[in-house]
Image (spheres, rainbow, N blue to C red):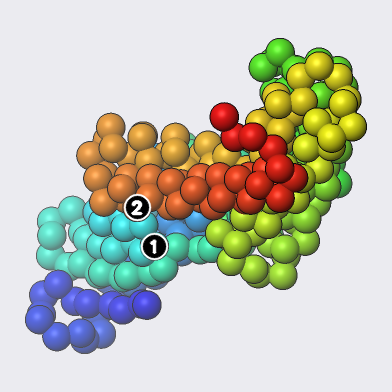
Amino acid sequence: MMSSIDSASPLSVALPECEIGDDASLKEICLFLSEYSAWLLGSGATSIRLEKNVRRMAESLGCFAEMTILPRHIHMTVFLPDHSDSYTYIIATHPMPISFDINTRLSRLSWSMADEHLTLNEARRQFEKIIKTPPANKYLVLFLASCANAAFCRLFTGDWAAVGVVFMSTLIGFYLKQILSSRKMDVRLVFIICAFVSSILASTATLFSFGHTPDIAVGTSVLYLVPGIPFLNSFSDMLNGHYICAFGRFVHAVVLTCCLSLGLCGGMLLMHLSMF
């Protein structure tokens, strides 16, 4: 959903061209900052980072920006220092996997605009390059995620047999997650299926008596699905007064955790493993 509103009138009308800095109008600045915000929030940034970055960029272009951050939309208003003109735009957040690479690059862009006094056209060119950043090698991510989850198993006093089982169950479960996500399947269903598959594979440690800690293997086999970043971001948003966004992110994280638990319980029931 996108709309533009002139604050000087109750009706939506075209704004007069207002020259700022490098001959950029308020409309152009607002559209650019809105698109920037949609990508930054979609890549996993907290609301406080988004606010600081956008305000820094707006000031470097000779205006001010205020925004309302909602779980799936951003309401952006850009106005002149003397409040003689303004432009408002509403944009949906960009749906994408969490990317620390894009997150970091977009934050660097805000500092480049402030320190190097980039024009709007220069900032837009850099922005276009950033959003085209290729994702990390999926096979490397798959291997590292499997190693990390196996390390969690060892951290929770799992023996080496359990570590090996967790590594393999994570490797297969995470690969399945990559395939299902690439096919645009609902993320909640993806969590249920992947947790179900990983828990069944990890239960082989019990069925075939691998090692002395098969229960730890089953319990840690689904930890790669825990939505840690949404939980952390919701807590950060709450501390900084973004209660609506914090609540939305928290509920989303809780729903994903419930889906994870549902898949884990389903796998344990199928394999006749005791939950207590």
Badge 1 marks a residue whose secondary structure is loop
- Does the residue at mark 2 contact the one at mark 1 (Cβ under 8 Å)? yes
Q: Residues within 10 Å of mark 1 (few under 14, many from 20)?
A: some
According to the image, label 2 marks what residue?
248
How many angstroms separate mark 2 from mark 1 (CA)?
Answer: 9 Å
Left or right: 256 in relation to 1? right
Q: Is residue 112 visible?
A: no
Q: Nearer the viewer, mark 2 or mark 1?
A: 2
Q: Quadrant of the N terminus?
A: bottom left
Locate residue 54, reporting x and y percent.
37, 49
Q: Quadrant of the C terminus?
A: top right
Identity of the residue drawn at 41% across and 68% down: 92
According to the image, label 1 marks what residue?
72
Locate residue 248, reporting x and y percent.
34, 52
Left or right: 128 in relation to 67? right
Which is nearer the N-term, disc 2 or disc 1?
1
Identity of the residue drawn at 20% across and 84% down: 12
Up/down of 51 relative to 218, above or below: below
Identity of the residue drawn at 59% across and 66% down: 186
Residue type marked 1: Arg
Left or right: 170 in relation to 130? right
Residue 120 badge: none
